Image (tube, rainbow, N blue to C red):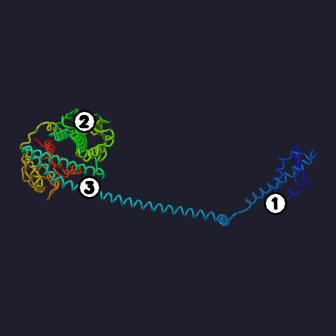
Amino acid sequence: MDFSIFYQDATTVIPSSKINLLNESPLTKSLSFAEMAKRQELGMFTTRENRRAATIINKAIDQSSNILNGVVLAQNSVLEKKMTLQDVFAEYAGFAIGVSFVIIFVLLLLIYSLLVSRKKQMEALKEAQNANAANIAKTTFLNHMSHDIRTPMNAIVGFTELAMKRKPDKEVENCLKKIRQSSEYLMTLINDVLDISRIESGKLEYKPVPVDLGEMVNTVLSIARGYMENRDLHFYVSREELKNPYVMADELRIREVLLNIISNAVKFTKDGGSISFVAENDPGNDEQHMIVRYRISDTGIGMSEEFQNRIFDEFSQETDGARTSYKGTGLGMAIAKQYVDLMGGKIEVSSRQGIGSTFTVEIPLLIAEQVRTEANEKLRKDMDLHGLHVLLAEDNDLNAEIAIALLEEKGMAVTRAADGKSALIQFCNTTPGTFDLILMDIMMPEMNGYETTKAIRNLPDRPDGKEIPIIAMTANAFAEDVQAALNAGMDDHVAKPVDMSILISAIIKYIKR
């Protein structure tokens, strides 16, 4: 028997086999009510008007009811079934095993990566340690070689200088000039190789000290004029008045930068040409700073645009034949650039082939308190050094002979001490004021120059020991050697082979007359 359910003028026909509201099973009730609800929406034909249509619709509803019943059964199955942990493991065992293998594989990869990374770090550390040890060994070797080369070179240069002063005949004079030129070239090679080696090993440090810029430029110009000796070159100098002459600077490196440029200008300018040196200064970013600018121009052979782009590279020369035509390693400008960069400045070049070149160097400097107030005036005077009594501490007989001859030629009286201990004894055995100056070698037996200087400075019963000028005159020529001399209590440092113009300038700065 079929049931006919009327709802809003519509008739839904439900087979009696599909509904049993008396059954208390929740599943049965869900199926019945779901079927009834489903058929309510489709009740659109009345059985009175068209029973055949109702029959057709009834069959369609019957099919949809079966589908709906399946859904309800599935939902009820999920809701009523309670799965235990064991069921979960049983159901998903394969999946869990797969995930475990993936995790283990990832962990193994991570451990392997860490081990490889650790090994690479250890290898890199070992390589760095080996490289550092090699750099230390190289630096030590170069230091020793520098000292050992400079000592005999000082004798060669010194005796050549003495021979030149004896006014030899033209042929001998020509030979002596060639010896001097070759000696200067050899020292340039040594200095360049040592400098570039220290740059590559990262040993460069910027340690500014109080400097009188006027004095420094005087020294540079004095050496520059020496470069132009026996050359037919016109040298023009323009120096703007220094608003703040005293600054914190690395005098040795600024001087080397300028002299590198000037020596190149002399080298590449033919006789009859000209070289100009211009010194200017501008205010800095604040009241505590200033900018110094040095412009060096020449009327030499000039450079191509292509070469200007690489002039500051190591071993850079215009052509392959430049090394034979013009002596040099191609390191001078690379060193100058490194020094200027170290000091926070800049160096630029402009040039035209066949016309000449101009180098401009700008360096920012910290203004310092006034130091050595009378030094500039002294340097401007042709000071008479006659009667100056010098204590010379020098263990090398040849170097001592040369120094004594050159100093006596300037009118100075020289007392030699063969080592540091002898120098200390001789100073102590004389009355205060006997010596006006001490020239101190560093590498000496008994007591080295540093120890001797400290001992003299700390003599309790000789107050003049704290005041007497002590100038290092040594083959230890690196920047740290200069600093070590200053730290020991010396006033200045002059490297061997000794350039007498530099030595005389240093003497004039410190003597009290």
Q: Position of residue 510 (x, y in %)?
A: 14, 43
- Crowding around mark 2 (Cα neighbors within 10 Å: few <14, some 14 to 19, many 20+) is many
- Looking at the image, tell me whether mark 2 or mark 3 is earlier in sequence order: 3
Residue type, label 2: Ser
Residue type, label 3: Thr
Instruction: Kindly identify which numbered label has been placed on residue 297.
Output: 2
Q: Position of residue 68 (x, y in %)?
A: 79, 54
The residue at which mark 3 appears reads as 139
Judged from the image, the secondary structure of the residue bearing numbered disc 2 is: strand
* Quarter of the view holding residue 336: top left
Instruction: Kindly identify which numbered label has been placed on residue 25.
Output: 1
Closest to the camera, between mark 2 and mark 3, is 2
Closest to the camera, between mark 2 and mark 1, is 2
Judged from the image, the secondary structure of the residue bearing numbered disc 3 is: helix
- Looking at the image, tell me whether mark 2 or mark 1 is earlier in sequence order: 1
| Vertical comparison of 82 with 404: above or below | below
Instruction: Kindly identify which numbered label has been placed on residue 88.
Output: none
Q: Position of residue 132 (x, y in %)?
A: 32, 57
- Looking at the image, tell me whether mark 1 or mark 3 is earlier in sequence order: 1
Horizontal arrangement in the rendering, residue 209 relative to residue 392 (left or right): right
Q: CA distance from mark 2 to mark 1?
A: 112 Å
Q: Is residue 483 visible?
A: no
Asked if the residue under mark 1 is in contact with the one under mark 2, i.e. CB atoms within 8 Å, the reply is no
Closest to the camera, between mark 1 and mark 3, is 3
Q: Position of residue 445 (x, y in %)?
A: 14, 58
Judged from the image, the secondary structure of the residue bearing numbered disc 1 is: loop
